[in-house]
Amino acid sequence: MDRTSLKILNKELEFIGDIEDFKSFYFIRSFFQAKEFQLVAHIKYANILNEENYIYISKKKVMIIEEIEIDEDKEQIVARGRDLKTIISDRVTVPPTNESYDIFSGTSEEVIKHYVEVNCISPRDPLRKIENLVLGENLKRGQSIKWQSRYKNLGNEIESIGRATGLGWFIYLDHKAKKIIFDVESGIDRTSKQNQNSRVIFSGELGNITNTIYKSSSVNYKNVAYVGGQGEGAEREIKEVTKGNYNGIRRKEVFVDARDISETESLQDRGLTKLSEYEHILNLESTINNNNLIYEKDWDLGDIVTIKNDYTVTDQRVTEVREIYEEKIYVEITIGNVEGTVIDNINSSISNIPNEGGSSSSGGDKSYEFNQLSPKKIWNIPHGLNKRPSVTIVDSGGTEVKGDVKYDDNNNATISFTAAFAGIAYLN
């Protein structure tokens, strides 16, 4: 077969070599998230397959090498990492000077690009600037929302906004101009019910998909959220947010802790965003036969297509595409909602812990959030909870970290680490 040429770029986005005789290679494109890749090649490429270098296929398919594994006996090197979107997850949402939160209103595209602009392109601290990153043209796509954020992982925030409003996000690379371009996409409606765009119908009967697995699950489905805003006990503001008119056994409720929300009108958006994480799971995983519907020509990632089988006909979005390069090139797709991995669920839980910078209570149990803004190996925390609370620690990238916790007394704790870093400690 004609082998795909993998171009390797260095940190300065300069071409330093290419690889055609790799042993295997796969990567995943996702509409909402950064996803992984793996390349297995001969050890002779160890001089160009270095961490922080780029693997370039096209402007839409660029990956960052984050891990290298060399097996001298097998004479092979394995490079792993994620696509270029991962650079956004290296930032948190820092509020403006003298403000507790960064609050912004607009279309979902405007809101997403605002947070990228102020945290990656034109941040207050020039050390946070990501060189060569620019924004695509603002077309004001998506519904109008009001969002507020404080020291949350930027990638997680963009994913939450995107899932709630139907916008995907991408980072493209113009390596000749040395520009990294952030943009959003809404996908194209290619369902059988419309007549403005070419239709795409995936069906085993039509011979364009094989090895198909259908899944439908309501295990984690919720359709009503009670969103708790600011206040204590009976004085706490509670907003009921629903997705449709559900009652009786069909009503599925969840409580959303939104103590970080300072404005009442934002509770509705927080509730809808949280409910988007509890959708009914309906998806299809399949291998594509590129015969009558050609990938990236007739359809692409993010498009809404029609799925037809013996049981039902449904319209769903193409949310993930896996490209596998071995003896042949295989394209596998996921259509519909994608279930989160264990890591995704942990990151989501951490991201949804309220940022208050002080103690609070819910149901009588007090909690405290401590923000360590400058990197330190020892954190001294005056929590004032009058107990020895459990402690969860995350670094500035949202990754959970373990430390040596010592309780000085019932109101003070000291946490020691092997290296200095900034982050947040949640005490409950």
Image (tube, rainbow, N blue to C red):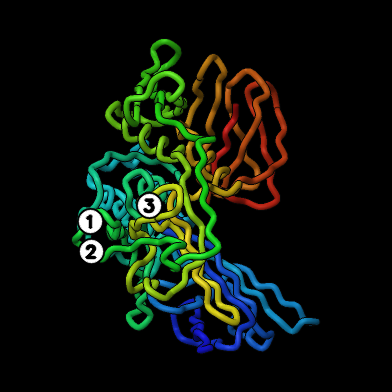
Tell whether label 2 touches label 1 (CB within 8 Å). Answer: yes
User: Is residue 8 among what the camera can see?
Assistant: yes
Residue 194, percent across and down?
Answer: 22, 56
Q: Nearer the viewer, residue 215 or 108?
A: 215
Q: Residue at x 40, y 55 (%)?
A: 308
Q: Nearer the viewer, mark 1 or mark 3?
A: 1
* Residue under pointer 3: 316
* Residue under pointer 1: 194
Marks 3 and 2, the one that precedes in the sequence: 2
At label 2, which amino acid type do we have? Asn
Decide: is 29 above or below 352.
below
* Residue under pointer 2: 197
Residue 318, percent across and down?
Answer: 40, 58
Q: Secondary structure at mark 3?
A: strand
At label 1, which amino acid type do we have? Gln
Q: Residue at x 60, y 75 (%)?
A: 39
